[in-house]
């Protein structure tokens, strides 16, 4: 990587640090499994809520429904909906099956879609899981 690009990346990282200085971070523990694995399912940093990936197994349409039903409940517990989601990352073991079931996902978002990245992977945390979705939502001041 050219040295000029490295310097620009380093400068960008340094310039963004003040934006996080003094930001309150709250981690929400949902079960002992989180300690066993070493993560938190939900973390709030300032006005952003980060939801770790929720993964499901089974036929893709059912797995999509179960995944989004669970994410909707996570958001609801923090006073949010999918309309508050600004970023979505989907990991799947079968991108073609995911694409074939876009109407299932679309039913949850309606016409208000977040920025999204979809990636096919060899496998997820458990070998039978077919989809994992992580979200970032913004908590607006009301």
Image (spheres, rainbow, N blue to C red):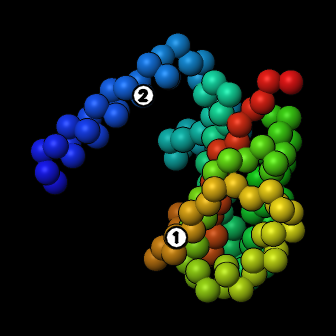
Q: Is residue 61 above or below residue 111?
A: below
Pointer 1: what residue? 119
Q: Is residue 23 left or right of residue 28?
A: left
Front: mark 1 or 2: 2
Residue 94 vs residue 18, the one in the foreground: 18
Numbered label attached to residue 16: 2
Residue 107 vs residue 112, the one in the foreground: 112
At numbered mark 2, what does the secondary structure look like: helix, strand or loop? helix
Residue 116 vs residue 91, the one in the foreground: 116
Q: Is residue 120 left or right of residue 104?
A: left
Please give the name of the residue rendered at 34% of the width and 33% of the height, measured from the top-left corner. Answer: 13
Q: Considering the image in quadrants, where does the N terminus appear?
A: bottom left
Q: Please tell me how crowded label 2 is: few (under 14), some (14-19), or many (20+) other residues with Cα within 10 Å.
A: few
Residue 123: tell me if it is visible.
no
Quadrant housing residue 79: top right
At numbered mark 1, what does the secondary structure look like: helix, strand or loop? strand
Q: Is residue 63 above or below residue 77?
A: below
Where residue 119 sits: x, y (%)?
A: 52, 70
Residue contact at pointers 1 and 2, CB within 8 angstroms: no
Q: Is residue 131 above or below residue 134?
A: below
Where residue 16 sits: x, y (%)?
A: 42, 28
Q: Is residue 68 left or right of residue 35?
A: right
> Mark 1 or mark 2, which has the lower sequence index?
2
Where residue 35 sits: x, y (%)?
A: 56, 38
Please give the name of the residue rendered at 46% of the width and 77% of the height, measured from the top-left corner. Answer: 122
Give the residue furthest to the top. Answer: 22
Please give the name of the residue rendered at 81% of the width and 34% of the height, measured from the top-left corner. Answer: 78
């Amino acid at each position: 990587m050219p040295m000029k690009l490295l310097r620009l990346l380093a400068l960008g990282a340094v310039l963004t640090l003040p934006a996080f200085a003094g930001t309150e971070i709250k981690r929400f523990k949902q079960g002992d499994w989180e300690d066993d694995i070493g993560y938190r399912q939900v973390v709030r940093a300032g006005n952003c809520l980060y939801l770790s990936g929720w993964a499901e197994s089974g036929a893709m349409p059912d797995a999509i429904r179960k995944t989004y039903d669970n994410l909707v409940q996570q958001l609801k517990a923090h006073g949010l909906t999918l309309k508050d989601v600004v970023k979505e990352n989907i990991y799947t073991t079968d991108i073609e099956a995911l694409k074939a079931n876009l109407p299932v996902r679309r039913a949850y978002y309606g016409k208000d879609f977040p920025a999204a990245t979809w990636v096919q992977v060899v496998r997820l945390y458990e070998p039978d899981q077919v989809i994992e979705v992580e979200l970032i939502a913004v908590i607006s001041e009301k």
